[in-house]
């Protein structure tokens, strides 16, 4: 691999980044202080080079994407009003509330799909069996696609409504056909901020324990951070540190996904947006700090397609996928399209100088667009 850090010392204008470069070249783990330097730097070009070096050393010039679809079976949610950042969840009597029938869900599937991402509200009346039935039916209809379904918040809810332990809930979901857990619901682990944006939802510790239980049962998962609201740089670093520690124990995480907060229609709509440099720093920090994660994903739905393309030069190795129809973030005003074609990803990745690789949910390579 070409050493893109060869002239780093000449180009770098922030000397606080130099020890980080040395650690990278010597394969040493970054600590809190390094992470702080990354969040404080104004030398974005040098930071990009460092994160890109780490990305290239993991998977070369490949950037992954998947032909996937998001399905949100219901937006009715018992904690609709307490998640201040969420514009998707609705109370049962809201005119915007909806529930999909199994037939409706099945009608959304097509043979091209390799990953089906299913998450939704905590419905006050649906039994755990209903959620299992959704997975079973989707699995029967789409045996060759992976099902990535239900966040840790939903799993905690299923445990509560069924009386089963979390481990039993996960086993039943796996038997029904779930292949991986999505990373949602992590939000921000820092208790003080978490309390302000989404009390009384699943605590950070519960989120981590549910993912730990899944990994122990052989079910891989993703992890997210919701950033760009009330968090400090220390909260971001603390969040990554907790994930890195868990990954050291289980190695069950597939990808980490920074999710940029969208304020429209939410109870946090008064918050001022952060500058784009903050998005770049969060993605680059994720790549550099989470040395035990294979992939950092650009969630183009929240970043917007153009900014997502820039993050490919800040450590990102995954572009998520076609998604086809996104509702959770668009209800909160996301400006991105609600879905894209396979060709869109091939072109956007190639135009950034990388090699597009179509993958499945578990990062098996399906096609390299060389
Ligand atoms: O956890 C809700 C977020 C997440 C807003 O695992 C919002 O591959 C921004 O988890 N502004 C769900 N974000 C999304 C998610 C996800 C997305 C893509 C890929 C994967 C994966 C997982 O949506 C929630 C929450 O953080 N969310 N409202 C909002 N207003």
Image (cartoon, rainbow, N blue to C red):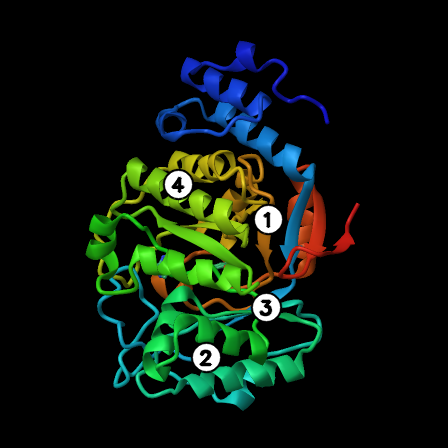
- Choose between 365 and 369: the one closer to the eye: 365
Classify the position of the C terminus by image quarter: top right
Tell me if label 2 and label 4 are in contact, CB under 8 Å.
no
Q: Is residue 11 above or below residue 304?
A: above
Looking at marks 2 and 4 on the same chain, the residue that comes earlier in the sequence is marked by: 2
> Which residue does the image show at 65% across and 50% down from the upper left?
64
Displayed quadrant of residue 331: bottom left
Looking at marks 3 and 1 on the same chain, the residue that comes earlier in the sequence is marked by: 3
Q: Nearer the viewer, mark 3 or mark 1?
A: 3
User: Farthest residue in the right direction?
Assistant: 370
Tell me if label 2 and label 3 are in contact, CB under 8 Å.
no
Residue 328 image label: none
Q: Which residue is mark 1?
A: 318
Q: Is residue 65 above or below residue 313?
A: below
Q: Which residue is mark 2?
A: 73
Badge 3 marks a residue whose secondary structure is loop
Q: Which residue is mark 3?
A: 179
Query: Label 4 vs label 1: CA separation?
Result: 21 Å
Q: Quick check: 282 left or right of 45?
A: left
Displayed quadrant of residue 125: bottom left
Query: Label 4 vs label 3: CA separation?
Result: 26 Å
Query: Label 3 vs label 1: CA separation?
Result: 19 Å
Query: Label 1 vs label 2: CA separation?
Result: 26 Å
> Which residue does the image show at 45% across and 60% down from the upper left?
211
> Which residue does the image show at 32% across and 56% down from the upper left?
205
Q: Position of residue 128 (x, y in %)?
A: 42, 84
Looking at marks 1 and 2 on the same chain, the residue that comes earlier in the sequence is marked by: 2
Q: Which residue is mark 4?
A: 241
Query: Label 2 vs label 3: CA separation?
Result: 18 Å
Badge 4 marks a residue whose secondary structure is helix
Looking at marks 4 and 1 on the same chain, the residue that comes earlier in the sequence is marked by: 4
């Amino acid at each position: 691999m070409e050493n893109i850090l060869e002239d780093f010392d000449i180009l770098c204008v922030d000397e606080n980044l130099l020890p980080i470069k040395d650690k990278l070249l010597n394969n040493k783990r970054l600590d809190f202080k390094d992470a702080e330097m990354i969040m404080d730097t104004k030398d974005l070009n040098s930071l990009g080079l460092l994160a890109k070096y780490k990305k290239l050393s993991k998977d070369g010039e490949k950037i992954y994407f998947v032909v996937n679809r998001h399905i949100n079976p219901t937006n009715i949610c018992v904690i609709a009003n307490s998640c201040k950042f969420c514009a998707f969840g609705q109370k049962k009597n809201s005119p915007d509330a909806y529930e999909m029938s199994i037939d409706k869900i099945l009608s959304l599937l097509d043979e091209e799909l390799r990953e089906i991402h299913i998450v939704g509200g905590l419905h006050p009346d649906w039994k755990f069996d209903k959620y299992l039935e959704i997975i079973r039916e989707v699995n029967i209809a789409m045996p060759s696609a992976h099902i990535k379904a239900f966040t840790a918040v939903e799993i905690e809810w299923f445990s509560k409504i069924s009386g089963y332990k979390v481990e039993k809930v996960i086993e039943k979901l796996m038997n029904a056909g779930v292949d991986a857990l999505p990373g949602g619901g992590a939000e921000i682990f820092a208790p003080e901020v978490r309390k302000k944006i989404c009390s009384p939802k699943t605590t950070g510790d519960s989120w981590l324990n549910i993912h730990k239980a899944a990994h122990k049962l052989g079910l891989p998962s993703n992890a997210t951070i919701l950033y760009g609201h009330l968090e400090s740089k220390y909260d971001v670093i603390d969040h990554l540190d907790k994930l890195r520690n868990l990954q050291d124990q289980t190695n069950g995480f597939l990808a980490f996904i920074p999710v940029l907060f969208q304020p429209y229609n939410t109870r946090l709509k008064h918050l001022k947006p952060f500058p784009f440099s903050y998005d770049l720093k969060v993605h680059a920090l994720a790549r550099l700090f989470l040395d035990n994660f294979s992939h950092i994903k650009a969630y183009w739905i929240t970043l917007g397609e153009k900014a997502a393309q820039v993050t490919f030069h800040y450590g990102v190795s995954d572009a998520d996928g076609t998604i086809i129809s996104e509702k959770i973030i668009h209800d909160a005003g996301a400006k991105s399209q609600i879905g894209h074609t396979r060709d869109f990803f091939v072109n956007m990745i190639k135009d950034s100088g990388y090699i597009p690789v179509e993958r499945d949910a578990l990062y098996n390579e399906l096609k390299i667009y060389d």
